[in-house]
Amino acid sequence: MTHILKIDASARPGFAGTDEHGSHSRKLTHQFVSRWLARRPEDTLTYRDIGTAPPSFITHEWIQSAFTPRERQEPWMARVLAESDQLIDELAAADILVIGAPLYNFGMPATLKAWVDLVVRMGRTVDYDPATPEAPFIPKLADRPRHAVILSSRGSAGFEPDGALAHMNHLEPGLATVLEFIGITNVHSIAIENQETGGEQLADSVAAAERRIDKLVDELNAAFSATREPEPA
């Protein structure tokens, strides 16, 4: 059985095309998860809407707590780290991480950066070994294959790899760096462009993204089915 963690980071509620000022990225994450569960209804889902319920920003107290060895932590430190622990537990339990993330000012929404800051944590999702200075960081979520699916929306066009504005896109590259750092190396990205342009250009981009999502669901379903343990005789 496969477990999905779905995260929506858009500040817009609802779905584009259905709700006024609805979100394109939310519509894409809904499509991926609904297609997946339609094919594999036995699989499970955890949903976190950080667009409407943002995680906390890290504070001095959080840093002090996170970098204090567990055996030396004071009771208040456990309370400070409780939210981070919950988010990390959700991430560690997932086989597929689905992130809906619009491109805001060339990067990820602040709510998503807050989530990143709480889940990239020494001793929980990454370790450090000074004895190997050439590769001192040890990703702790590399214990089994996990996939991340980044579903984004952009106001303009050209932000894809090799596009004219690719050098200004710090969303997917930034997320991929973070995820690979903690051990999630199978990263897939699909985006809608021309949101501000609208019209046929936007419609064509939406249709292309939806086709790519359906194809990715097929590919990942085949991959997980191939690695599924056989039923006992």
Image (cartoon, rainbow, N blue to C red):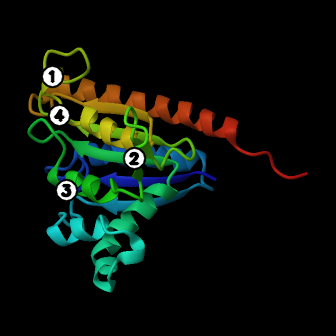
Q: Amino acid at mark 1?
A: His
Helix, strand or loop at mark 4: loop
Find the distance from the CA under tag 2 to the CA under tag 3: 15 Å
At horizontal 26% and vertical 26% (from top left) the residue drawn is 205
Would residue 102 be visible to someone looking at this image?
yes
Q: Quadrant of residue 207?
A: top left
Residue bearing the label numbered 3: 111
- Image mark count: 4
How busy is the neighbourhood of tag 3: few (under 14 within 10 Å), some, or many (20 plus)? many
Depth check, mark 4 against mark 1: the one in front is: 1
Find the distance from the CA under tag 2 to the CA under tag 4: 17 Å
**Image x and y of residue 187, in percent:** 41, 34
Give the residue furthest to the bottom: 75
Q: Say whether disc 1 or disc 2 marks the residue closer to the N-terminus.
A: 2
How busy is the neighbourhood of tag 1: few (under 14 within 10 Å), some, or many (20 plus)? some
Find the distance from the CA under tag 4 to the CA under tag 1: 14 Å
**Is 90 positioned to the left or the right of 198 in the image?**
right
Find the distance from the CA under tag 1 to the CA under tag 2: 24 Å
Residue bearing the label numbered 1: 167
On residue 154, the disc is 4
